[in-house]
Structure formats: C-alpha cells, structure tokens
Amino acid sequence: MTISRRKFMKSITSGAAYLTVLASFPKMVWAGWNKAAFESDSYESALATRYPGMPVEDSTAVTLKAPEIAENGSVVSVQVKTKLPDVKSISLFVKNNPTALSASFNIGEGMKPDVKVRIRFGETSELVAIVEAGGKLHRVQQLVKVTIGGCGG
Amino acid sequence: MKIKAKEKKGIVKVKMLIKHPMETGRRKDADGNLVPAHFIQQLKVTYKDKTVLLAEFGATVSKDPYLAFSFSGTKGDTITFETLDNKGTSEKADAVIK
C-alpha cells in the first residue's frame, strides 16, 4: 500500500498534537492558581476576580468559625462549613490584609463542604467566607480582633 | 507532610500539616532585606484517580499550613497529596486511610 503525501502529513501532525497534549498534561493539572485574584489588594477586586459576575448574598446556611480575638495574628484557625448542596468552592478573604484572598478550596468528587485552615491576619479585620453553590455566592462575615502586643488585652 | 486520615461511617476525616516557610515576600530579615516570597500555591488531593480537593493558597496562609477536611472514602485505600509552591517545587505524599 502506498501512502499519499496528504495522508502522511495528516498522520504526522495528528501524532504531534497527541504528543503535545501528553507532554503538557502535568502542567495543565497545575494551571489552576488564580494569580490575579490572589494578588488583588482589595477585597472587592479579589472577589470580582475570583468569582466574576456572580451574585452575592448573605447567608445563614454557612457556618464560619473563627476566634473573636486572636492573640497571634500569624496563626488564626478558621473553619467554614455548610449544608448547602452542590458546593463548588469555598474561599476565605481577610479584608485588611495586603492581599485579601487567603485561600480558595475547589470542592471535588466526594468532598464534604467543610474545611479548616490556619491563616494570617496582619491586623484586626473583617473575615469573609464565600461559598459557591447553585450558581450563587453565599457570604458570611465576622470581625477578628488581633492583639498586636500579645498581652491578651 | 504529616497526614492523618481516619474513616468512620464512610466519611474520611483528613488532618494535615505541611512543612513550608510560607514567606509572604513582605517580611524583612535581621539585616533589613526583604525575604523573597516562597509559599505553597496549590494542593491537590487525589483519591481513586479523582480530584477530591484542589486548594489554592495565597501568601497569607500561615507558616507550615494546617488543613482539615473530610470526604467519602473507605478504610485501607490510599489518598495522594501533591503540593506546588511559587518556585515550582512540588512535593508528593501518600496516606493510607485508617
């Protein structure tokens, strides 16, 4: 059987495309870090960059657990959980930090919408938890006071 | 990475601690020089070839990040954890569900 030039070129190019996909795959998996959102200095721009054009409403279906007074701003334990169905992601914002978006959790297969993480507060600030579910953003916020002197006052 | 994964009634509770400096890039050392940013940006948790969690971290996550979460899984199975920091360093660890 003879192979026409056209067929030959076709097989070569499709093979090359396949190889490129294979080679780039490990990097694609890591492509998710939202640089623009994490580097936004204000809460408003970080939120708009992380969740462009999505409606936000205050919610009672989300539980945010954080200390009212944190003696050490560099380690503040925060928990967010909800009973809302179809949760796609949970994000934490510290309004007064130099970069407001602290962490964002993309909820995958089988994961419960319940996360606990330790984050930093540069100073006393409003902490905002956003739960993305059902095409909407559910918001809960709380003030966390940070004692800089460390005297517990 | 220190990982504990415990199953109870089909729900696996994971608690983990990742050793990492998590430098924000804003801190100055003793000589007044800025310490360059060095922090974990992503953590991927895989169970049975599926991504359970893809966490994105900013520089404001505390040093040696601690994380707790839960998912549906079975005792004896393995979960895989992979981190990637802003310098491109990746770390991988497995844990068996107890």
Image (tube, rainbow, N blue to C red):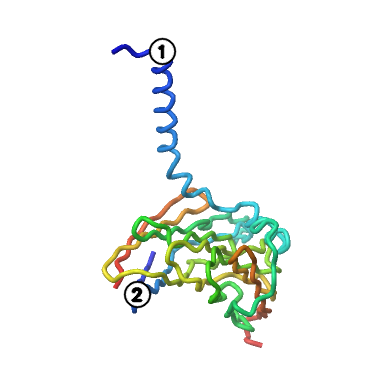
Contact, mark 2 vs mark 1 (Cβ under 8 Å):
no
Answer with left or right where residue A120 lies relative to residue A29.
Answer: right
Q: Position of residue B90 (x, y in %)?
A: 43, 52
The alpha-carbon separation of the residues under discs 2 and 1 comes to 58 Å
Quadrant that contains the N terminus of chain B: bottom left
The chain letter under disc 1 is A
- Name the foreground residue: B39 vs A93: A93
Same chain, labels 2 and 1: no
Q: Secondary structure at mark 1?
A: helix
Above or below, A67 against A13 in this view is below
The chain letter under disc 2 is B
Question: Most extreme residue toward the bottom, as rendered?
Answer: A153
- The type of residue carrying mark 1 is Arg
- The type of residue carrying mark 2 is Gly
Q: Which residue is mark 2?
A: B10
Name which quarter of the figure residue B57 lies in: bottom right
Q: Position of residue A67 (x, y in %)?
A: 60, 82
Q: Position of residue B54 (x, y in %)?
A: 48, 59
Q: Position of residue A15 (x, y in %)?
A: 39, 28
- Name the foreground residue: B64 vs B4: B4
Answer with left or right where residue A27 lies relative to residue A121.
Answer: left
Q: Which mark is residue B93?
A: none
The structure residue drawn at horizontal position 28% and vertical position 71%, both measured from the top left corner, is B75
Q: Which residue is mark 1?
A: A5
Above or below, A39 against A26 in this view is below
Graded by Cα atoms within 10 Å as few (under 14), some (14 to 19) or many (20 or more), the crowding at tag 1 reads: few
Name which quarter of the figure residue A26 lies in: top left
- Name the foreground residue: A16 vs B66: A16
The structure residue drawn at horizontal position 58% and vertical position 56%, both measured from the top left corner, is B35
The structure residue drawn at horizontal position 67% and vertical position 64%, both measured from the top left corner, is A100
Quadrant that contains the C terminus of chain B: bottom left
Name which quarter of the figure residue B18 lies in: bottom left
